Amino acid sequence: MPANRFNAFTEYGIGLGLRIPHYAHILEKKPLVDWFEIISENYMLEAGRPLHILDQILEQYRVVQHGVSMYFGNASRPNRDHLRKLKRLTKRTQTPWISDHLCWGSVDDRYTHDLLPMPYTWEAVETTSRNIREVQDFLEIPVAVENVSSYVEFHVSEMTEWEFLGEVVERADCGILLDVNNIYVSSKNHGFDPYEYLDAVPHDRVAQMHIAGHTKFERYILDTHDHPVLDPVWKMYAHATKLTGRTATLLEWDDRIPSFDEVHREALKANKFLPHAKSLAA
């Protein structure tokens, strides 16, 4: 598969989220890890302990930034003050790409602090792709948008989620952060075939993947990130890697976080699914 600026990060193997409970272990033991993903908003500061820790991490590890508040699907244009702070951080980390979610989350500067699902309409395609282009142009690095897990659908939608994702990334000329667990969660909540989703997305635009654990309740599945990846998600991940080729992959574990070694072992299971896997941490 020919590489472009979105799927060309083939030397990135398996990454871990940089989380506070693991700071001491990482700085003391210096484990062999391919790269760390940071939540951008936690480090968009002038000074303080988070940046002090980040600078120590950057001395030894590659770091990729992931955001949770860009809200590409908002009707309003991206906040310029937020973008300036974000760009300053990208200069510090030298992140090769940056990701955030395909969702909306604020109106008139009132923030929900949640990743709200979007109506899959042509109007939303235009608005969302406009916002992504503006962010990508301002930051001057590739942007990858992540599909979110969802629990409600809009009757006004004019296409499927995967059709919407494909239209947005083509018009915005951006990448995809393909969250395999989110596809599985949404497929069970809304009754679609997750493999149809995987087959339909533009595979050459997948810059990164996420895998994670979820929790099954009586009537729905919740994206909890609080335990190991379940077998159906591993099977989907194996299928996805056949479609995209070797792709940078991150294990998300954000609640009830166990020891660093346990999280690391779980993440490294992904290596057996990556074509020609030669993870630094394997």
Image: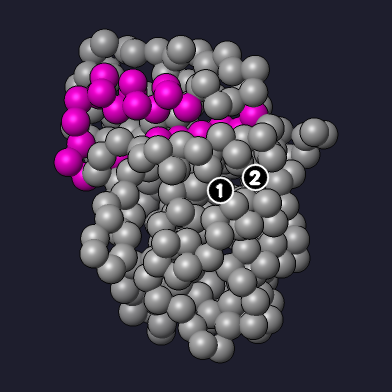
Q: Earlier in the sequence, mark 1 or mark 2?
A: 1
Quarter location, residue 152 = bottom left
Q: Position of residue 115 (x, y in %)?
A: 39, 66
Work out whether residue 193 or residue 262 is closer to the camera in this orientation and state it: 193
Say what secondary structure mark 1 lies in: strand
The residue at 44%/43% (across/down) is: 233
Q: Amino acid at mark 2?
A: Val
Kindly tell me whether residue 108 is visible in this rendering.
yes
The boundaries of the magenta stretch are 246-270
Q: Position of residue 251 (x, y in %)?
A: 40, 35
The amino acid type, in three-letter code, at marker 1 is Leu
State the residue at coordinates (41%, 57%). Answer: 185
Q: Secondary structure at mark 2?
A: strand
Tell me if 156 is positioned left or right of 5 in this view. Answer: left
Q: What residue is disc 2 on?
A: 206
Circle number at residue 177: 1
Q: How many marks?
A: 2
Task: Check disc 1: other Cα within 10 Å, few if <14, some if 14-19, many if 20+.
Answer: many
Q: Residue furthest right?
A: 2
Kindly indicate whether the residue at mark 2 contacts the one at mark 1 (C-beta within 8 angstroms).
Answer: yes
